[in-house]
Image: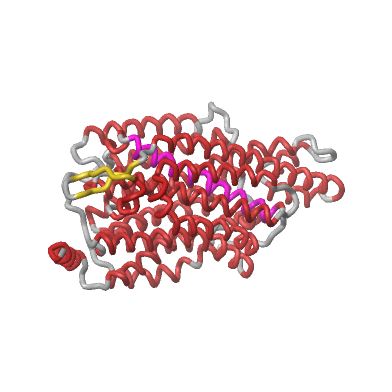
Amino acid sequence: MSGTTTAAALRRRAAGAGANRWVVLVVLCVSLLLVAVDATVLHVAVPAVTEDLKPGGIELLWIVDVYPLVCASLLILFGTLGDRVGRRRVLLLGYALFGVASGLAALADNAQVLIVARALLGVGGAMIMPATLSILRQVFPDRRERALAIGIWSAVAAVGAAVGPLLGGFLLEHFWWGSVFLVNIPLMLVSLPVGRLLLPESKGDGEGPWDVVGALMAAIGLFGVVLGVKRLGGGESIGSLLTVPPLVVGAALLVAFVRRQRRRTHPLVDLRMFARPAFSTSVGCIVLAMLALVGLELIAAQYLQLVLGLSPLETGLRLLPLTFAAMAAGLAGARMLRRFGPRRMVCFGFCLTAFAVVLLTALGRTDDCALMVSGFVLLGFGLETTLFGAYESMLSEAPQEQAGGAAAIGETSYQLGAGIGIALLGTVMNAAYAPGLSGVPGVPESASSAAGHSLGEAYEVAAQLGGVAGGALRHAARDAFVHGLHVTLLVSAGLLLLGAVMALRLPRVMQCEGAGGAVEVPAPRDAAESRVSV
């Protein structure tokens, strides 16, 4: 025991540059909080952005989901770049870019500028996120302390997701929608000098060349596929130059990336981990869980404001039960995992979430607060249970020497699921909503077509028409949106049940790293300990 303590002390002295590691943790958590808040802060501001900038349906989807998609695309690139040039250096550059992009987004006067600014925010976020986790692993070499630090780090991410809509609602009550971005600038101005003073610099072992070509292939390929799918989902012709070519080129680049990684001695991503059923299943479960959560949060925010007429601040408060339930599930997660194991835990989480989603289909044009809170509580608890069990299984399946790569894959899956969720469920919502506005009595076809882009635009068209025709269009648009919400919820429930079936491939036992290598132990006994080996 004394030898272990001495070794931990030596590692701690070698890892840090004299800074208090708990102060470093605070700095890193502030960094993560900004990135997490920015992923959700815009949700309650969507109606205000729609009214001011008047984006089209596809432009509105890009405004919201370009941030997580860019971030997901570049996590591996900047994570491995930090290993080469220094993680603190990449983190500080991410701070600077995040602040500049926030100012650009706040002052955007059209949808295109806002999309570009959100994309730059995604680049900054991709520089910040892997660097924070890499530095955290460096300054907490002791396994028990690192487990506590990672727990705090994860909790901050959940708090950030909750604070986003609430902060956005508060700012919209008192300022214009650009203030949800402007608030980032003073925080970044403080984080830059503090991070430069307190954070230690670190690099990887430098083994093998950095595969910049592979990183670019993955990022561009992902964007091409998503762009093609989004345009097809938005009703674009299959013969459009901006639909099929990006889809084909993106898929080809991703296939080439996989082949390239398999051939390389030092790949960016060790794809052999995906040959393990538990690892690949866990990644799929994370994507499906985030797909349901973020897409539903966006649609719920529009429902609360545009259908029920709640203020942005009231909307943020209505979404809080979901986050509180998720935090409760996180606190109970280790105990549930010890008792039930990953397979039953993740299956239960998916099924509970699917039940909550089906329950929410009872929502209509009138406010049913009790039903909504019940559904959100079950939704938050079920999804966090799913994510906890999936992450635990994924990390325990990865060999110790590949734990960093496994963590990067987990973060990428998390962000990718969030971005695709907004795009996919938003596309389903639009497809179910638009037909309900055709043939409204007294409304011209051109007005119905314009109103079919979004509920916000429908309200604007109805106000311009006025009279009986305007009232009929507004009534039809509200009913069509509620119908679209129900269809979207049912599609989401189907995806969640698919996740429950997928989770049956997870093992009933966990693998922990022992003195002699990987040792299988029953999940009820040591599942929680496997998380410490991250």
Q: Residue 217 location in percent, x, y?
A: 33, 38
Check the image and name the residue furthest to the left.
3
- Image: magenta residue range: 277-306
Along the horizontal axis of the image, is 510 left or right of 248?
left
Residue 274 sits in quarter? top left
Q: Residue 302 magenta-drawn? A: yes
Q: How is the image coloured?
A: secondary structure
Residue 332 sits in quarter? bottom left
For the point 35% across and 38% down, the residue is 278
Q: For this rendering, which residue is in front, 497 or 135? A: 497
For the point 49% across and 34% down, the residue is 228
Q: For this rendering, which residue is in front, 261 or 10? A: 10
Q: For this rendering, which residue is in front, 51 or 486? A: 486
Q: Residue 195 location in percent, x, y?
A: 32, 69
Along the horizontal axis of the image, is 396 left or right of 476?
left
Q: Could you tell me which quadrant the N terminus lies in?
A: bottom left
